[in-house]
Amino acid sequence: MRQLIAGIDIGGTKVAGGLVDGTGRLLKDVFVPTRAQEGVRTSYSQILKVIDRLIRAAGGKQNLAGIGLCAPGPVNPKTGTVINPPNLPGWKDFPLERKIAERFGLPAKVENDANAAGLAEALFGAACGYRHVFYVTVSTGIGTGIIINRRVYHGKNGVAAEGGHVSIDYRSPYRCGCGTLGCIEALAAGPAMARRARVLLEQEHTKPSLLRTMSGGHPERITPEMIAEAAGQGDEVARIILDETGFFLGVWLAGMITLLDPEAIVIGGGVSRIGKPLFDKIRETIPAYTINRDFAVKTPILPAKLQENVGVFGAAALLLPAGEEVEGSWTGGPLPKPKPCDAHLTGRRGLRALNSGTSA
Ligand SMILES: [Zn+2]
């Protein structure tokens, strides 16, 4: 029975793996530290360890349809080569997809983490039921994924959907890590929020602010969580920063709506957990900055649903028939057609039930 897919989420600090069935249920999860600082040999062996454990949990690799992996970008989606992610030292042009496929004798697929997360949210998460989805994750950076007809859009060179590096202000004083002025990442990601708060506190040095007390007088310790909390308590400086963040994201997303006319936008990542005040400001801003206002205001702006499991679901989704480039090359035998809205955790109980042939 080849009903299970191993989904592996490779991060800078941990490798998470899970067994996902064809209906989008996560049946088993495993975590190990990546040990990225110890170099590629160690971090790659940590990944193998996770896969070995999942194969044992599945009752042997004959029960696996394949192994999907998501890694920090850049990744070549055609070859499944991990190019040179800054948080995985020593990984340079690492042919991850080929190595995993050869070692385990199973189909393997590698994708960058934002694209995989977008696919997961479109198939199993907040945007299940929609075909054309723009996915955004706002945390220490801003990553995006473009899902068209329930497939990842890669562009000609495989480097499409770098939405975080679209500039909304070419005169901005803030230069992005990519070198451009005013990328949305340099304006609205977590570190950018904290930086704007520090600048404003300096400008308004006579104005009292909860952020000064919360950070213990060390503005460099200000976090997006502090800003959200202070804003919730009515702090004026924090409110300005939160409002600006929603405004910047709104202007940028309005452009994305103008360009893509998506059926839904999903926003995940740590900063998105600020929730309603941020989403309200984004929704309020969009109509003034897009051409088809009547359509734009009806575009659902949804909070991500899959949270910390999004990478595992996204990696597994790469191997589903509804996922990326599987049609025509599918070799894993019959998989049940995915029921996209069913994603939920069933834990070990679910795996036992599946293996014994009863429903979880
Ligand atoms: Zn940039």
Image (tube, helix red, strand yellow):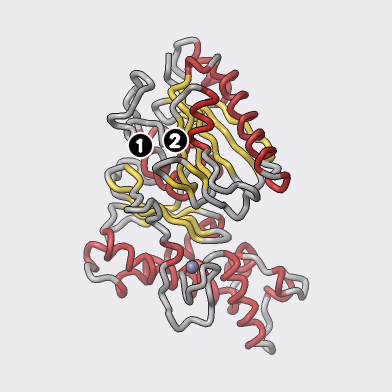
Q: Position of residue 267 (x, y in %)?
A: 44, 55
Residue shown at the point (71%, 68%) measured from the top left: 221
Residue 323, disc: 1
Spatial CA span between label 1 and label 2: 11 Å
- The residue at which mark 2 appears reads as 109
Query: Which residue type does callout 2 highlight?
Result: Lys
Q: Position of residue 223 (x, y in %)?
A: 65, 65
The residue carrying pointer 2 sits among few (fewer than 14), some (14 to 19) or many (20 or more) residues within 10 Å by Cα, namely: many
Image quadrant where residue 197 sits: bottom right
Q: Is mark 2 within 8 Å of ligand 1?
A: no
Front residue of 312 and 236: 312
Closest to the observer, 85 or 341 = 85
Residue 260 in percent (x, y) is at: 28, 59
Q: Is residue 179 left or right of residue 50?
A: left
Q: Residue at x 62, y 39 (%)?
A: 15
| Residue 73 - label | none
Q: Are marks 1 and 2 in contact (CB under 8 Å)?
A: yes
Amino acid type of the residue tagged 1 in the rendering: Gly
Q: Which residue occupies 30% across, 62% down?
A: 257
Above-or-below relation of 330 to 247? above
